[in-house]
Image: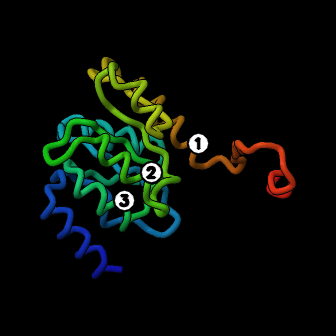
Amino acid sequence: RAALTRTVNKVAEDSGANPTEDDRDAIASGDRVLLVVENDLAFAEVLLDAARLAGFKGLVSNTGAGALTMAREFHPSAITLDIFLPDMQGWRILDRLKADLSTRHVPVCVVSTDDSRERALNSGAIGFIAKPVHSRELIDEALTRLKTYVTSAKKTLQLLMAESPERDALV
């Protein structure tokens, strides 16, 4: 585990991860982890603090490459995703996360300007925080909803199929 953590830390540092005091060295099996993908270090710290208050351990990356690596290595419970990153657009990251079988189930909350809300939700995000954020309460509420979502024992599956014996068998 220590060797894996050192490798992941090195990869994250090489790909430009934020130099925050996140929880990457304190994550244990079974922890709920929020991956914060944010290019603004001060705002990443606000999200990290809010994540901890909501009961998550937090990871921070300020690049898309670092975020994709950390998502595969740490298997976060949820992700907050800024759209404007130095190495790639957040839309590309969201597309990659949703196309990868190992990460497509992870709920993503996009953090961007309000004109991106519809695109974010249509692209597979389950939540949206509009920038600029005017109150910490909005962040706390969004992360509490994310925590509720990931800890809920009851899951809903929507099945879109024409009536058939195969559909009946699946139901």
Of the numbered discs 2 and 1, the one sitting upstream in the chain is 2
For the question of whether residue 156 can be seen, the reply is: no
For the question of whether residue 98 can be seen, the reply is: yes
Q: Nearer the viewer, mark 3 or mark 2?
A: 2
Of the numbered discs 3 and 2, the one sitting upstream in the chain is 3
Give the label on residue 149, or none: 1
Give the label on residue 5, or none: none
Question: Which kind of residue does numbered mark 1 sit on?
Answer: Tyr
Q: Secondary structure at mark 3?
A: helix
Task: Bin the neighbour count of mark 2 within 10 Å (Cα to Cα): few under 14, some 14-19, many 20 and up.
Answer: some
The N terminus: image quadrant: bottom left
Q: For the residues marked 2 and 1, what is the alpha-carbon distance in whole angstroms?
A: 17 Å
Report x, y in % for residue 142: 46, 31
| Count of residue discs | 3
Residue position for label 2: 98
Report x, y in % for residue 128: 42, 29
